[in-house]
Image (cartoon, grey):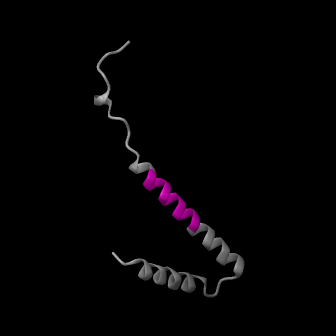
Amino acid sequence: MANGTEIALSVTAAAIALSNGLEPDETALLGSVFTQLGDTLTTISIAASIKKPDPSAESGSQV
């Protein structure tokens, strides 16, 4: 995997390339979309890492 500097440089280059020819409001919208994408990917990752209780670990007694 690339190190942090390589990732930052790649993201910066991508942002510059994507924004070429866009109006400021279009660039802002694109940034907002990518922010939402990142937030959603983070939410999915965190939700997947949360372990659900193991039903077999519960005591066998029922009241």
Identify whether 27 is placed above or below 32: below
Please identify the dominant SS of the magenta region. helix
Identify whether 18 is placed above or below 53: below
Residue 36 lies in quadrant:
bottom right
Q: Which residue corresponds to the image point at 57% horizontal and 85% vertical from the top-left?
A: 16
**Residue 48: image location, x then y, percent:** 40, 50
Drawn side of residue 6 relative to residue 21, left or right: left
**Residue 21: image location, x then y, percent:** 64, 87
22 inside magenta stretch: no
Give the residues in magenta: 35-46
Identify whether 40 is placed above or below 51: below
Identify whether 25 is placed above or below 47: below
The N terminus lies in quadrant: bottom left
Across the whole image, how many numbered discs are drawn on residues? 0
Nearest the viewer among 27 and 11 is 11
**Residue 46: image location, x then y, percent:** 45, 52
**Residue 49: image location, x then y, percent:** 39, 50
Drawn side of residue 41 relative to residue 21, left or right: left
Q: Which residue corresponds to the image point at 58% horizontal and 66% vertical from the top-left?
A: 35
Q: Which residue corresponds to the image point at 53% horizontal and 64% vertical from the top-left?
A: 37
Nearest the viewer among 18 and 11 is 11
Nearest the viewer among 42 and 25 is 42
